[in-house]
Image: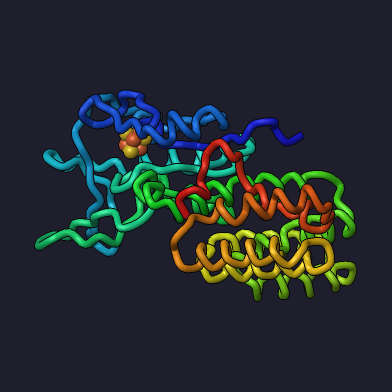
Amino acid sequence: MTPERIRLGISACLLGEPVRFDGGHKRDPFLVESLGPLVDWVPVCPEVESGLDAPRESMRLVQADGRIRLLTNKTAQDHTTRMHGYARRRVEELANGELCGFVLKKDSPTCGLERVKVYGTAGMPVKSGRGLFADALVRRFPLLPVEEEGRLNDPRLRENFVERIFAYRRLTALFAARWSMGDVVRFHTAHKLTLMAHRPEAYQRLGRLVASGKSVARRAFQDHYSTDFMTALATIATPRRQANVLQHMLGYFKQTLDRESRAELLALIEDYAGGRVPLVVPLTLFIHHIRRCGVPYLADQVYLRPHPVELMLRNHV
Ligand code: SF4
């Protein structure tokens, strides 16, 4: 059974829990106030859950003897083994949690996803590391949408992440049931415009996979389709590709919409491509005409509503 609401893992300090090394938190207003009402959070603080106190001595990643270690800053206590053991156990527990994504605290030697400082024996730190828990998480769930809260301040990355968590839920729901190739064809068809906005070639490639699906072992097919689908969506949908999708949609109105209305849609597509209006503007008019004229193929496209409208994510891309 797929839960009604999206379940997302999160570094607990981002929700305002006082679990940081200094006893404070890093409450993130977008996550708590905007996304929060639409999802169920699964808060995780690896440092506290692995037995450390809050407050505690701060830590950092240190490269020594060819290994990355998690050491406290002043007294050099080594928490590497403790954290590796905890992370291995915790990600296995999370495997049963039906998570659709995870938001991690940036820069943390435990939770940071990328560009975490790694100190050597001398000199300046290099921003090349990944927190130990974050590393265990992405290795265990390679397709799970995972982002840092800092990157979610970028409207395009934010929209992409939220789109992916909802897509991941639909994908896992598809393959959780006893699926048929007909179910996959319907899923793939409904995501045509979505895939085209991200990676048009992936839509074609996955289409060929679906067409040959009956000759492929079910598990191999599922893995292949899921990996290619989620990888495609991780590519940011550029304005040029979005405009191509809108042009493609316009083609469906040749018979049903008068010349003036089509010209109005075209002008809005050009305004969007030129950066004068956000994506929500042409899309809103498209949705109006789809409803009015009845274009079932377009009406069934996930692209029209990939995530809850109340987040207003397409007002900023
Ligand atoms: Fe805990 Fe991770 Fe936040 Fe550090 S960054 S306080 S380990 S949740």
Task: Depth check: give the residue in front, 190 or 176.
Answer: 190
Residue found 89% across the figure and 57% down from its top: 182
Residue found 82% across the figure and 56% down from its top: 295
Q: Position of residue 140 (x, y in %)?
A: 55, 51
Q: Is residue 46 left or right of residue 221?
A: left
Q: Is residue 273 left or right of residue 299?
A: left
Residue found 60% across the figure and 39% down from its top: 308
Image mark count: 0
* Quadrant of residue 59 within the rendered picture: top left
Give the answer, above or below, for where 18 lies relative to 279: above
Task: Depth check: give the residue in front, 63 or 113.
Answer: 113
Give the answer, above or below, for where 45 lies relative to 169: above
Q: Is residue 290 left or right of residue 88?
A: right
Q: Is residue 73 left or right of residue 29?
A: left
Q: Position of residue 299 (x, y in %)?
A: 78, 52
Residue 123 visible to an observer of this rendering = yes
Residue 223 visible to an observer of this rendering = no
Residue at the outermost front position: 260
Q: Specify the color scheme.
A: rainbow
Which quadrant does the N terminus fall into? Answer: top right
Quadrant containing ligand 1 reads: top left
Q: Position of residue 256 (x, y in %)?
A: 83, 62
Q: Position of residue 298 (x, y in %)?
A: 77, 57
